[in-house]
Amino acid sequence: MEAKKEVWLRGENDPSVAAELQPAANALLQAGEELEALLKDFPDAWLWERPAGVAAVGFHLKHIAGVLDRLLSYAEGKMLSPEQLAYLKNEPVADEMTTDALLEQVSRAISATIDRYKQFGSPLLTEPRPVGRAGLPSTVIGLCFHAAEHTMRHTGQLLVTVKVLQNG
């Protein structure tokens, strides 16, 4: 059986996503697939374990979902809502969510992010956008790409944490 190709090599681009954002959309889809495969049968009891003091798997999953929403709000020219700020504050807090529930939350966040990408046509991508209370400079495309890059960063960190827990 042939191994499944990575998302970016499948040629399944969404025509309603600007060509400049398609690589970011592909990275998000790839992260979702990798997380699903990696966390199949992952014990809920390990979600908040922190081997060697690294961030817990549960944190990474909550953070991915939250950061996607926050970065796209900035890309849309919005400030964060009180609900988004409360979610951010609670990302590192252990809760009763299961691995499957957290994966579903990430999957929904990835789908919503790609749907939000569709509003940004090529002419909008270089528009400036302030980030955070300090109004740090970015652009629509910068925020959209950072959403994908940051998701992959946390996916990689989560992968290592899972492997340490499984083999520790």
Image (spheres, grey):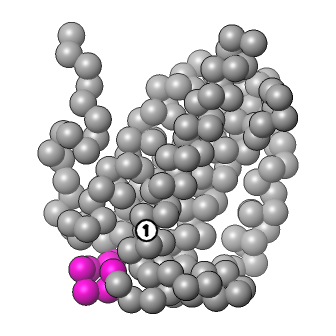
**Could you tell me the amino acid type at mark 1?**
Cys
Q: What element carries label 1?
A: helix
Query: Quadrant of the image for the N terminus?
Result: top left
Q: Classify mark 1: residues with Cα within 10 Å, few (<14), some (14-19) or many (20+).
A: many
> Who's the residue at 36% across and 58% down the image?
24
**Corner quadrant of residue 49:** top right
Return the x and y of residue 103 as percentages of the image width and height.
57, 39
| Vertical order, 99 against 126 (above or below) | above
Residue at 45%, 56% in the rendered image: 148
Q: Magenta includes 138? A: no
Q: Position of residue 53 (x, y in %)?
A: 84, 35
Name the quadrant of the C terminus: top right
Q: Give the range drawn in magenta.
A: 119-125
Instruction: Give the image quarter of residue 52.
Output: top right
Q: Which residue is drawn at 78% across and 37% down?
A: 54
Residue 98 visible in the snapshot: no
Q: Residue at x 63, y 60 (%)?
A: 66
Is 86 on the left-hand or right-hand side of 138?
A: right
In the figure, is residue 125 to the left or right of 105? left
Residue 36 x, y percent position in the rendering: 49, 31
Q: Classify residue 9 by image quadrant.
A: top left
Residue 161, can we see it? yes
The image position of residue 5, as x and y in percent, is: 24, 30
Q: Name the residue under label 1.
A: 144
